[in-house]
Amino acid sequence: MRKLFWISSIFSICFISSCGTWMQVIDVDCVNTKTKENVCYYENDSILVSYYFWAEKGIMSFTIYNKLSIPIYVDWKKSALISNSTKLNYWEDEEFTNTKTTYTSNSFTFSEDFFKPIITLPNHGGVTTYGEVFNLSLGTTVGESYSNSTKSKPERVTFIPPKSNFFKPTMHLTDFSFVEYNKKNFSEEIVPSSLNDKKTTKIMVAQLTGKNIFLSFRNFLTLSTNENFTNEFYVDNEFKVKTVTMMKENQFRGKYDRQQNADEFPYRKSSSYYYVYPYGIF
């Protein structure tokens, strides 16, 4: 009887709070850029800048294509991500130390009946162990570690050759991890299930306007066609969030693609990003 009560209680809690992980997909409005196939892009006679935001918490990443027959230079000290009117630097005058450590070990394992060595070697940054041992009772490991350190500074000025691309991943669009759910701001919609075309599922959608637009951001770039920057020109592309869609994780992930060995993620778009919502939906 006590067991039946426990199961019933868990069922009730899950029913009230809609058990399972919920996701939020945030669509971005490309304010002063064009959009093609869900990609925000800006183009003039010299360059083509295309954007990719899809990541948890969003990421300001973009590709600059040099359309000219001469080089183009980008000054990152004079460029920035501007998030809700706050300037976030793409470049800092800092020096970084990168350390790489390689470890090789030989592990010998003893059992009551026999002794058999297992050789453990580094493999693509991981560890591969060859051999099998049964009746494990005692193990010892002997190894050596090698470290190499290099110092580097971030590139302040990037040179982009004629007719070529340069990809720049930078930083998250925002630090806060979710948009608080409120029934007054969200409306329910019934949509086809991303797991089964013959079924439907519920999602919640909020259209953001006015004071509800919690994030607007700009990508400001300073460029030139000569290394001395005597003829600077600028890119100032603006974006703002426009829609928040909430759904369960299985709807977010979609079907499993065996050929790609990955989930389909049907809501993935270059002009969107996502959060993991930490609470249930009541």
Image (cartoon, rainbow, N blue to C red):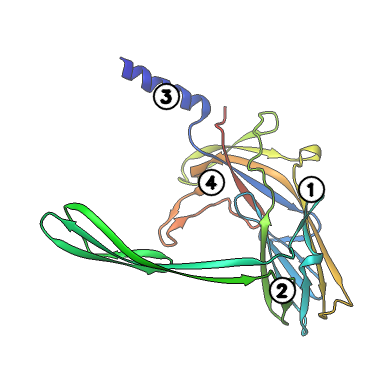
* Drawn side of residue 131 relative to residue 177, left or right: left
**Front of the two marks 2 and 4:** 2
Q: Residue flagged by tag 2: what amino acid is it?
A: Tyr
Q: Which mark is residue 252?
A: 4
* Drawn side of residue 274 relative to residue 201, left or right: right
Q: Position of residue 149 (x, y in %)?
A: 55, 70
- Local SS, label 3: helix
Where is residue 269, by image quadrant? Answer: bottom right
Q: Establish if 62 lies above or below 18.
A: below
* Drawn side of residue 21 relative to residue 84, left or right: left
Q: Establish if 162 lies above or below 98.
A: below
Q: Establish if 183 lies above or below 95.
A: above
Q: Residue furthest top?
A: 1
Q: Residue under circle 1?
A: 84
Q: Residue under circle 2?
A: 65
First in sequence, mark 3 or 2: give its number: 3
Could you tell me if the residues under marks 2 and 4 are in contact, i.e. CB atoms within 8 Å?
no
- Local SS, label 1: loop
The mark tally for this picture is 4
Residue at the image position 47 percent from the left and 27 percent from the top: 14
Question: Is 212 in front, or is 169?
Answer: 169
Q: CA distance from mark 4 to mark 1?
A: 28 Å
Q: Residue under circle 3?
A: 10
Q: CA distance from mark 3 to mark 2?
A: 55 Å
- Local SS, label 4: helix
Q: Residue furthest left?
A: 113
